[in-house]
Image (cartoon, helix red, strand yellow):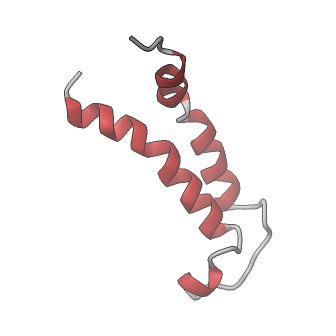
């Protein structure tokens, strides 16, 4: 697998985690948004996407070191 594809696979989970935090109301001052439900709407979706994209991280952690 090309190096760029490996980096993109690892970048998905942290990106979705940050988006979930920003949409949960923690970063509403930064985005100039009104605080909504902490676990509703987009933050729930981003949280689930983060969980589903943890597979490359788990594979990286489970791989034996040399």
Task: Name the side, left or right, on which 52 lies relative to 5.
Answer: right
Task: Name the side, left or right, on which 20 lies relative to 4.
Answer: right
Q: Nearer the viewer, residue 37 or 25?
A: 25
* Quarter of the figure with residue 7: top left
Task: Name the side, left or right, on which 4 lies relative to 53.
Answer: left
Identity of the residue drawn at 31% across and 31% down: 6
The correct choice, above or below, for 44 with respect to 2 in the image is below
Identity of the residue drawn at 59% across and 34% down: 52
Q: Position of residue 54 (x, y in %)?
A: 55, 33
Q: Nearer the viewer, residue 11 or 41?
A: 11
Identity of the residue drawn at 63% across and 68% down: 23
The correct choice, above or below, for 10 with respect to 58 in the image is below
In the rendered image, the quadrant that contains the N terminus is top left
Task: Name the side, left or right, on which 6 lies relative to 28.
Answer: left
In the rendered image, the quadrant that contains the C terminus is top left
Identity of the residue drawn at 62% across and 87% down: 29
Q: Position of residue 20 (x, y in %)?
A: 62, 59
Q: Position of residue 38 (x, y in %)?
A: 78, 66
Q: Position of residue 26 (x, y in %)?
A: 69, 73
């Amino acid at each position: 697998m090309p190096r760029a594809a490996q980096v993109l696979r690892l970048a998905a989970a942290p990106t979705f985690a940050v988006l979930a935090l920003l949409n949960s109301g923690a970063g509403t001052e930064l985005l100039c948004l009104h605080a909504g439900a902490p676990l509703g709407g987009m933050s729930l979706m981003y949280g689930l996407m983060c969980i589903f994209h943890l597979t490359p991280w788990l594979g990286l952690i489970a791989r034996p070191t040399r």
